[in-house]
Structure formats: structure tokens, C-alpha cells
Amino acid sequence: MRWLNSFLFLLIILFFIIFSISLSSSSELGISPPKIKFDGDVNERICKNINLQSIPSGNVFLKDSWSDKSSRDLREYNKKSDDLGIAVSYPEKTFVSESSDVEVCFFGTESGKFYGVLLADVENGNAGVGIWIESELNGEFSEKSSISLKENEIKPKESQSIVLTYLMYEVIFLIICFVILFYLFSRAKRGIE
Amino acid sequence: MIRGVALFGAFIFVLVISLSGADDDGVLRVEADVIGKFISIQVDDFVFLGNISVGQEVRSINPMKINNTGNVNISIYSGLVDQNDELFKNLYFSELASGPYNRIGGFVLSIPFSTDPDDIETESFYVKLNLKNYSGEFEEGINRVGANVKFYALAE
């Protein structure tokens, strides 16, 4: 009888543990920095990195909205970048395993101040976070230098291509060294024989 | 043999003391990792409001919780994922159970960040579905309905 009481007590504890775990399901999403500035000249591609954090890991979706005036109220950001003659590029969907860096680029053909917000949310969850965007572009519009920034186009980083070039040179150098060593070794072997 | 062990022990002792002790010049170096500003929130994923009929309103018994897990003061904005959802357009939020309630989209919740690194600031709010003025119809019996709500955190 005593063992039955103990068994029932354990069963109740187990039930409460399972019940509390199933109720406390929640998702966590983070973004850094809270605000980014894209200051520069018209027709200049300005890029900045942002950091995303997601628990659990999953796809994070990004989108941007704009406003005519500076405001800290998200409800006033209901314009598209096209309406203001600006373009913002970033990967719309990013898989974030704990933490990931994402490059965000800004491009405008007209001078002025621009106020926007970049919002991130998760696929399965209701947490969303955002970054305030501020941009001040100087200079005048020039047809000759006008280039378009394709939606979501991210150019490979220059530093990456430099590293690859050096790596290639290093491999070639090692192959040459190996051939010379092999030649010397064969010659020495023949000399011994 | 004993002399050898004692000498070896003394050597180890001196080594440990010299490695673990402060620098010879008596300067203590203090280091810390300072975390840059970031926004992070943790939100409850599910709330069941119970039974409701058209012409009634129902309120969550327990409050929903949002944790400010970042290190800046934030404002939380709410919105329906499907903005054309006629039924859940009638969702309201309030910091107090007694109200006043604000319709989804108009509700903004401020959460300061905790000044204690070991603590997380939490804010609670109540959810209400008000179908008093809803004109849609449902089939007989129980119809389980639901909608996804997003909560966006931005720096204040």
C-alpha cells in the first residue's frame, strides 16, 4: 500500500512537470544594433551588418517599411521604399542557428533624410524585433552614375576574394615545392643505387 | 626517496603559487565583457480563450507574458499575420484585467530593460476577444478558430 502511495505521488509530480513544460513554450528573437544609420552620397551603395539571434534555430524573415517623418512609432511606418526612391537590399529569408550576421545595403538616387524600420520575425513563433533606420544622403542626382540596386542582391565581400586568391597562390607554391622535392629525392635515390 | 618527493612537492607548490598569484608589480587586472546594445524578446506562443458565442466577449484568465531579454528599453507593437482576418480583428489587449482594452494594432506595451544583469524584465497583458458587434456566422456545434499574432519589439 505504501509503495502505491509513493508511485501515485511520483506520477503526480511527473504530470505537473510535463504540464508546465507544455505551457511554457515560447520563442526568443534578438537583433543588434537597435538603430542603424546609412549616411553617404546619392548613388552610393552603403552597407552595414546586423546580427540576428533566434532560439530555437529557424528561418528568420526580414522586411522594411518607411515613413516621411522621424518617429519612434511603428504604426507611422507604412510606406514602401519604392515610394521614396530608395532601395534596400538584404536576404528576405535567413536561417539563423543561434546567431547570424546579415548584410543590409542602402541605395538612394535623391538627396535627403529617410526614416525606416527593418523588421525581423520567425517562421514558427510570434516574436518579432526591429531596427530603426536613418539615412542622410548628400549630393545631386546624376544620370551617368545612376545604377540600380537589385532587390536582395548581396555582392560577395572583397576580403573573401582576396583570401581565395592568396589560397590559390599558396596551393600552387606548395605543388611546385613538392615537385622539386620529389625530383631531388629521386635523384638522390638513383645516386645511392 | 622521501627527500625527493618533498623536493618535488615543494617545486609544484611554488609553481602553483607563482601561476595563481597576482603580478609581481602588485597590479590587479580587471576584465569584463561589455555587451553592445541589442533588442531581444521572448513571447508566449499560445493562449486559449475558452468558449464564446457571437454577441459575447471572452478574456484570458491568465495574462500573457513578454520578456525583455535584451539591454534596451523597448516598445512592443502587435499585429495580425493575416490582416484580413475579420474575426480576430476584434482582438483586444490590456495591461490590466479590468482594462482599458486597445484593439490589436493600436496596443503598445513598454518594457524597460533590467538593470540587474541576472534578471529579466517581464510585462504581462490580458487578451480579450469581443464578438459583440461581429456579424459573421458559424456552423452548429463547436468551431475551433485561431489566428497568429506577431509582437514586434523596437527600441524606445
Image: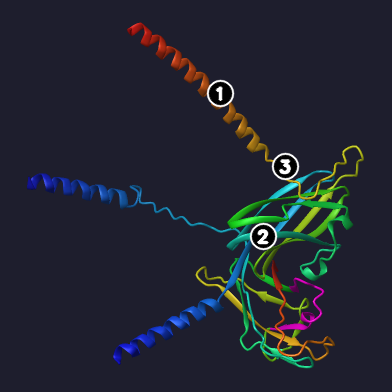
Q: Label 1 is placed on what type of residue? A: Ile
Q: Nearer the viewer, residue A127 or B153?
A: A127
Residue B100: where, in percent of width, then height?
A: 74, 88
Q: Which residue is mark 2?
A: A60
Alpha carbons under labels 3 and 2: distance apart: 20 Å
Question: In the rendered image, is residue A75 in sight?
Answer: yes
Residue B15: where, in percent of width, then height?
A: 25, 47
Which image quarter is the C terminus of chain A in? top left
Tag 2: Cα neighbours inside 10 Å, few (<14), some, or many (≥20)? many
Q: Which residue is mark 1?
A: A172
Q: Nearer the viewer, residue B71 or A105?
A: A105
Tag 3: Cα neighbours inside 10 Å, few (<14), some, or many (≥20)? few
Q: Which residue is mark 3?
A: A155
Color scheme of the displayed model: rainbow
Relative to B148, residue A52 above or below: above
Kindly identify the residue that appears in the image at 47 percent across and 15 percent down: A180
Residues at marks 3 and 2 on the same chain: yes
Residue at disc 1, secondary structure:
helix
**Could you tell whether A121 is left or right of A181 in the image?**
right
